[in-house]
Structure formats: structure tokens, C-alpha cells
Amino acid sequence: MKTRVGARRPSRPTGAKRHPRGDSSRRPEATAEAPLSAAKKVERSVIELPQSLTVKELGELLKVSPAQIIKELLNNGFMANINQTIDYDTAAIVAQDLGFETKEQQTAELGLTEAAEQERIAEDQSALVPRPPVVTIMGHVDHGKTSLLDAIRETNVTAREAGGITQHIGAYQVEIHGQKITFLDTPGHEAFTAMRARGAQATDIAILVVAADDGVMPQTKEAIDHARAANVPIIVALNKIDKPNANPERVKQQLADAGLLIEDWGGNIVCVPVSAKKKQGIEQLLEMILLVSEMGELKANPTGLGRGVIIEAELDKARGPVATMLVQRGTLKVSDNLVVGQVSGKVRAMFNDRGKSLRKAEPSTPVKILGLSEVPKAGDTFEVVGDERTGRLIAANRAKQKQAELATAQRAVTLDELFSQIQTGQVKELNIILKTDVQGSIDPIRSSLERLSTDSVKVKIIHQATGNITESDVLLAQASKAIIIGFSVRAEPGARKVADTAKVDVRHYDVIYNLVEDVSKALQGMLEPTYIEVIDGHAEVRQLFKVGKNEVIAGSAVTDGKIGRSDFVRVNRDGKVIFDGKIASLRRFKDDVREVATGYECGIGVEGFNELQPGDVIEAYRKEKAS
Ligand code: GDP
């Protein structure tokens, strides 16, 4: 646990000069760049301390025994054990008491220099070498995604590893003509987009499985849009060609209608007929993957520290957190120190998809590792760091950053804020996901929306379909910074929840004109912000008083919540709303008041409404800008 003692530290002994935050401007430093002149003599040596460290580590840094550190801490009114983590301020006090000057080491700087160095290594063009492509299989349910993944795995076990037992670790590698291909073993565009929504792009090529007897179905179209939104090339695997009712030509036609023009049809999309069941066409499919990957010139630098992404992870009762990770750059080695998201750890053991123990793993290799302190999430990125402490510091720093980010919540694109987002250059394209109740509504809405494109912002429908708004739509919106427009459809409960957390803007309309007008106004910065109602409380009218000529004041009792002077009110009589307006006056006895709480009596005047009666219920509400 990290403890801060600065605040409750007893008053300092006099005479001890301290710079708790390491004010470097006030004293000379013995650095290589600035050798000390004879005039600038330093009696105390300067020590750089991290933002947090253990008592033991502080002892090592200061070259004194941990016992001495503990004693100094005690002198300052703080009890600690040898493994306790203390913060910079505390460590600085101890160090200064022991005759050191202190300077705070910047974690960010530390991370940055390292990151910059890694970036330099990674970008070093001369060191880039081709790497295996990483492939995800997508398509409609029951079109054969799982069967195809199994068929590929079974037919292409590398010769030298044959006999090894296949392990389901979430990804596997096959070899063809001496070249490797990595497959992610969780089929479907949902997993793919969920990873993207977490900021990770692991896939280089999407295989779109379409059953030749069934053709293009809703999830086929969805998969196409998800792959396109991610800019990932698509290869079509025309599956189940063994079936007597397979109709490849019809499927190709449907694909063309869905915007995928395959090579036979004059387009550039590769299409390979396969049968996952009969294991036909598998080799051709793999060859095509290599071809497409060569065109994409997939390269990475295998030197430098390993970096990549978590594919899946779980807690194993016996072995602790177990994670399948895909190395994307550099080389991951056993005993490397890692930061994964906000968690640090060490690679204690590493295995490939056949359970074989590995010492190191190069780019595009999926590996299963043991040694993390917690279970990370799929889509978290990992990086190797120089030592354990750096790992801990970066992880702690990230946790802090995350909190700061949450506080200033990085806003998704919203119609309300679109104009300012365009003005500040954050948005150049308005991505829209359009869900409608019937097919017939799609085209007119789509074309009306696309016509709203201006020079500064392009309106782009990245996915359109009939049916309710699903979780998958929301993930796509999150990953692609899109808004969702529902036309005469609702959001499924799960989708609504995810949208709320991810702050994805979901709009509902029943009239095309309103829909188009809202988007148009948003583009011009003229959209009225949407408001939500917050009910403040209720009051029951007990008796009436006449003031002035016409004005009626209702002597009322606040039955729940509170009534605010600036509230809007609805007057309910016999369960029906008979008037909706604003409060004109709110008084307790003769005094105007700002609000009246539950259990109190007050006089309420309603603007423009003098027909109040005893027994009426006044509902007070506020309008708040929806966030
Ligand atoms: P998924 O939902 O896309 O993962 O589809 P599955 O792999 O579970 O396959 C759905 C069904 O189609 C299963 O009954 C498979 O046996 C069958 N199937 C898959 N591929 C083929 C194929 O090439 N030919 C035939 N005839 N059936 C297949």
C-alpha cells in the first residue's frame, strides 16, 4: 500500500534544509553534462527518487541499511516495514535527513525516454522484416467459421511440431510453404470490434466466411462493415461448396450488392471456394492469405523490447493469471518484466499453441504466459520494460492517468458537441451507424444524410441494417467514433447499457425530416442541446389564497424531494397532467425562498395558471443538459 506521511509528519527539526519537491533550480547538480566548477561546490550528493518505491529499494539507492531507513521513518512518526511502498515526499524527507539532496524522477519522462527509444527501434526501416499475417475469421452464424478454423489447424500442423497436443489458447499458428500465418481463434466480428473499442488492432486480414448454400446474411453484412471500418482487407471464403445446393454465383452477386466486388466480377476481392467439412480449398485459402499479406507488406522489427496485445486471459486455479498475448513488435522473452494495462508482471513461463515451452517469441507469435499479478483484459496492450520497478511505476502512473482521463472523460463524438468538435479539428468525418425498422427507409435516409457532407466534414454511413440497435452496433460506434441513429427501432437493453458507459450518442427518430434536420443543424452548430428532466419533488395543494387581483397562491405541503424556485412544474389532477409550466413564486410565510424541503409547507404560485385546487399534486422538475 502506498502511504503518504508528509501531512502528518511532526514539525521538522530546525536547521535541516529541505527541498521536498526537489527544486533543481536552487542547487548545482553533479551531472555529466554540467561538470561542477570549483566555485560551485556541493557538499550533499543529489539523489533521484522515483514517485514511489519500497523501503528496501530506498535503502539500496542511498546505500544504507533498510533498518536505518525504518529508523528514520520512525523518527518522523511513521512506522513502515521493509517491503512497504512509500511515496516521493516521504522518501525525500528520509533521504534529506540522511544528508542527501533529492530530485524527483519523472515517471512520465522515464516512460517517455524508454518509449521514444523503443519507437526509434521499431521505426528503424532497415531493421524491419516481414512478419506473419494475423487473421480473424468472420461471418454469419452457422456458415462454418469454427469448422474452418478447425480444418485449417488440423491440416497445417507444422511438421516438426506434429504430435504436440493442440491447445486452445485463443490463437494459433500454421505454416504453409515455410511461411507462418497466425489465426485468432475467437471467430466473429464482435470480438474483433470489442478489441478495437479497447484501442487494439490485432488483425491484419479478415476472412469472411459465406456459406455457398445460404448466401449473404445480416451478420455477413455486419462483418463486412466492421472489417471496413477498421480498414482491414477482406478475403472471402466461400464455404460449404460440397453441398448440392451450393450456389457460388448467386453469392457473388449478393456480395457485389453488399459492396464487395470479387475478382471474377471485376473487383479486387479475393474469393476462395472451400469446404471446411471435406477440407477442400484450405491450402488455396492459406496461399491467398499470404498473397494478400505480401501486398500489405506486413513488417515488424523483431529487435528491441516486446510489445503487443492481450488476446484472452483467465485465472487458473493452480497457476494464477494466464494470458494469451500476441507479440506485435520486438521480442518477448522469458523473465522479461511487463506492464499490461495498469498491471505489472514478469514472464515466468511462456508456451506456444501446442503447449511447447518457449524462451522467446517474435512478432505475430501468439503465446501463453504465466507471471502476471492480475488477469488482464482482452485488448489490453502490453510492453516489456527494463526492470520490475519501472514496470510498477508505469503501471501506477497509468492507473493515475486513467483516473484523470475518467475525470475529464474523453468524449465520444456527439451530435450536441459535433460543431465544436469540427471546429477544433477533432472531427473531419461524421461516422453514422443507421438502424431502421424496414429496408425501405435505409436508402432515403442514407442519401439525405450523405448530402449533408460539407467541405470540412464528410457524413459517412459506416453501417446500415434493419433491426434494433445491438451491443455490436455500439461497440462499432465506440471503436469508430460514430454516432448511432435508430429510425423507428429501439436499443436492446444490453446495448443501452454499453452505450451509456461508453458515452456513445444514440438518437431515436420516427420522422425522417427531424432526423435529417438534427444532423444538419449539428453540422452547422445550431442544434439545441438535448435536455433530460430531473424530477425534484412533489407538493400537495392544501388550500388556496388569493393575492392581488387574479393571482392564486397554493398553500401546499412538500410530500417528497424538494421544490426549487426556478423549477418547472406539472400540475396533476386525478392522475392527469392538466398544466405544464414554471413556478412564479415560492414562499415560506411571507418570505421568498429558494427551495423548500420535504415535510415543510409553502406557498406556490404557478406562472399563467390560476385554477389550482386543493388535492392537486404539483410535480417540480428541472431540465438538465444531457451528457
Ligand atoms: P459457425 O457458427 O460459423 O462457427 O459455424 P460452424 O463451424 O459451427 O458450422 C455450422 C454447421 O455447418 C455445422 O453443422 C458444420 O458441420 C456445418 N459445416 C461447416 N462447414 C461445412 C462445409 O464445408 N460443408 C458442409 N456440408 N457443412 C459444413
Image (cartoon, helix red, strand yellow):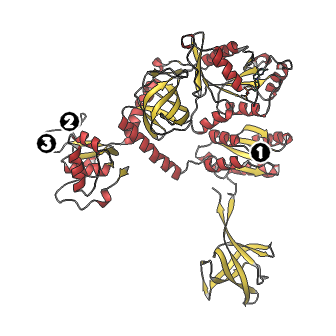
Residue mark closest to the camera, 1 vs 2: 1
- State whether residue 232 is above or below residue 71: above
> Would residue 252 be found to the left or right of residue 587 on screen?
right
Residue 336 in sight: yes
State which quadrant residue 537 falls in: bottom right
State which quadrant residue 577 falls in: bottom right
Tell me the residue that label 1 is attached to: 468
> Would residue 68 be found to the left or right of residue 447 on screen?
left
Measured Cα–Cα span from mark 3 to mark 2: 11 Å
N-terminal-most mark, 1 or 3: 3
- Dividing the image into four quarters, tell me where ligand 1 lies: top right
The secondary structure type at the circle numbered 1 is loop
N-terminal-most mark, 1 or 2: 2
Q: Residue drawn 67% across and 22% down?
A: 149
Amino acid under disc 3: Ala
Measured Cα–Cα span from mark 1 to mark 3: 77 Å
The secondary structure type at the circle numbered 2 is loop
- The outermost residue toward the front is 318
Amino acid under disc 1: Asn
State which quadrant residue 626 falls in: bottom right
Tell me the residue that label 3 is attached to: 39
Residue 307 in the image: state x and y as whole percent.
48, 29
Residue 457 in sight: no
Quick check: is the Cβ at mark 3 less than 8 Å away from ligand 1? no
Tell me the residue that label 2 is attached to: 35
Q: Residue drawn 67% across and 29% down?
A: 187
